[in-house]
Amino acid sequence: MPTTLPICQIQFPEIKLATRDAHKLRGWFGNVFKEHSPLLHNHLEDGTYRMRYPLVQYKVLNQVPTLIGLDEGAQLLTKLFTQLKEININQRSYAINAKDISFSQTEIGYATTLHKYQFETLWMALNQQNHIAYLNIKLPAEKNEFLNRLLIGNLLSFLKSFNCMLLEQERLMAQVEVAEKSTLFKNQKMLVFTGSFVCNVVLPNHIGIGKSVSRGFGTIKKF
């Protein structure tokens, strides 16, 4: 059944950063507001990783620093960031003279029609285990099907995080159209993907799908 999800988006249009600076946004904001909530850095108070879809995500979209808050993360962003005066990134202080803040109630869930989405940032689909399995596949069509299954897993994980459950007769379908890319992640070369996909799921713009979405990976936008 579809679920309504509160979403807050905050952008700082006068500040220009590189896409790779998204993790620095996460680090800076998580440190400045660390006493307020573990949601900001996806770690619990004892330092252990919070094993759930990140409710606060940090991105740089078209050079614009962007924060996305979902569910209780949306309320938190609205509360904390309206009074923000500056951002410090790369040992440089950026004065905040303008903020674009939007708050919406967005429906998510299974759809009877197909929807097409583009990856605005690189999709990190693979972990250590399935990375090896993917490299061992020789035929392009089989690689594509492998990625389709991973994407369906990503989508199910996203929906489950917000208690959006499928009915017995509902089955997710997904078809990727992506190209391989490489990027450095924590000083390690990673295989990632760019492109688009079609699926029978309604998704909000600018949320992340896949791994490391709190750092800006896998950000999507509907065609």
Image: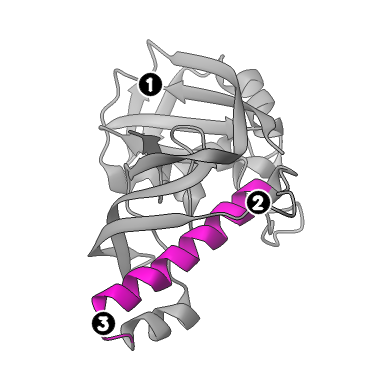
Q: Earlier in the sequence, mark 3 or mark 2?
A: 3
Q: Earlier in the sequence, mark 2 or mark 1?
A: 1
In this picture the colour scheme is: one colour
> In the image shown, does 208 or 188 lie closer to the viewer?
208
Determine whether the residue tagged by mark 2 lies in a helix, strand or loop: loop
In magenta, the rendered stretch is: 137-159
Q: Residue at x 76, y 52 (%)?
A: 45
In the picture, which quadrant includes the N terminus?
top right
In the figure, is residue 136 to the left or right of 208?
left
What is the three-letter code of the residue carrying label 3? Leu
Determine whether the residue tagged by mark 3 lies in a helix, strand or loop: loop
Residue 24 located within the stretch drawn in magenta: no
What is the three-letter code of the residue carrying label 1? Phe
Q: How far is disc 1 from disc 3 in space, using C-alphas?
A: 44 Å
The residue labelled by disc 2 is 170
Q: Badges 3 and 2: C-beta atoms under 8 Å apart?
A: no
Q: Earlier in the sequence, mark 1 or mark 3?
A: 1
Name the mark on residue 12.
1
Which quadrant would residue 123 be assigned to in this image?
bottom left
